[in-house]
Amino acid sequence: MYEGTVVKSTGSWYQVKGSDGQLYQCRLAGKIKLDELKLTNPVAVGDIVSFDLEDVEGVGNIRSIHPRKNYIVRQSPRKKHLLHFMASNVDQVFLVLTIREPNLKLGFIDRFLMMTEPYNIPVTLVFTKSDIYQDKDFKLLDEVKRVYAQMGYDIVLFSSVTLEGMETLKRALSGKTTLISGQSGVGKSTLINTIQPGLGLRTEDISEFSGKGQHTTTFAEMFYLDDGGSIIDTPGIKTLGFSHLEIMDVAHNFKEIFAHSAGCKFADCTHRNEPKCAVKEAVADGRIAEFRYQNYLAIIDEIENQNYWEIHDDV
């Protein structure tokens, strides 16, 4: 039996880097479940697996998955009742964003953090394309820094043109496994190519018709860095849904909302219409950012609506 790390997932086949440094094309030997979650892909990039080899050279069968220290899953964009593995066993996440081209969506940040907070995975907000920012963009960036820095998130400004922030990111990447993710078109592949020249990841311009980014990464893949450590590149994300969560899951994973909820009159307060809600009081006096609270409300309303239609879709 061999051991190795899954470095690429392409559907039914997984590329595994064995402890001997060789790459093997592997498939699952049987059904593997994860905590009873309904998954589109039971094996993730970053998994440590045991596998054996077939008669065909370099082809193997994954027999078991070693215990994971963490994992990141999202609602499948195509099958909303299933979850999709993004990665496992990561030390940190770089969430790649930009203020313009395409314009920043603050709601996306909070939705993404819903996937990392349950495991307390450190997240750095990396704002790319800083060389094209205008005065109004820097004002928005200052507000983002004010809100997220006080919750413990690091913020780095990066430009592939001026190389602003590159050394900071390289130091942060050294010796760690880092998931790099973001919406389509934010410059994720360009950032990776700048940090690790020679990878040659394909990049795309923003669509002139839609103003949105185009997908350039098809499957999740791990790359090893010259300076030590590894990165997991993921396909660009367009939307994030949470039909698999309950309202309290959301409330517990918005850091400042959870912190203030201790002062609410009711233990099961959803922070909407309940009396003596400490969270609403904190929003009113500015201790919780209004946009964060509105993003929280949007997510729980969406969860309630999805769950309603799932229950009543046979009517």
Image (cartoon, rainbow, N blue to C red):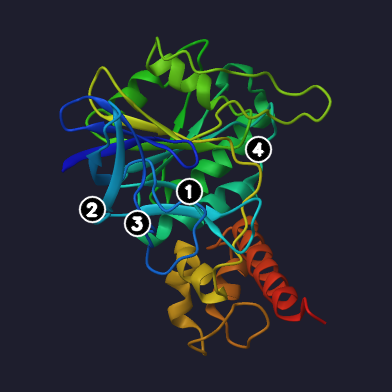
Indicate the position of residue 49 as horizontal and vertical percent values. 25, 46
Amino acid type assigned to the residue bearing label 2 in the image: His
Report which residue position mark 3 lands on: 120
Closer-to-camera residue (29/221): 29
Report which residue position mark 1 lands on: 148
In which quarter of the view is residue 222 placed?
top left
Report which residue position mark 2 lands on: 66
For the N terminus, which image quadrant? top left
Amino acid type assigned to the residue bearing label 4 in the image: Leu
Closer-to-camera residue (28/107): 28
The label nearer to you, 2 versus 4, is: 2
Q: Find numbered disc 3 in the image and state the secondary structure of the residue it sits on.
A: loop
The label nearer to you, 1 versus 3, is: 3
Amino acid type assigned to the residue bearing label 1 in the image: Tyr
Report which residue position mark 4 lands on: 104
- Residue 255 in sight from this viewpoint: yes
Q: Are marks 3 and 2 in contact (CB under 8 Å)?
A: no
Nearest to N terminus: mark 1 or mark 3: 3
Q: Label 1 to label 2, Cα distance in Å?
A: 34 Å
Nearest to N terminus: mark 1 or mark 4: 4
Nearest to N terminus: mark 1 or mark 2: 2
Relative to 26, 12 lies left or right: right
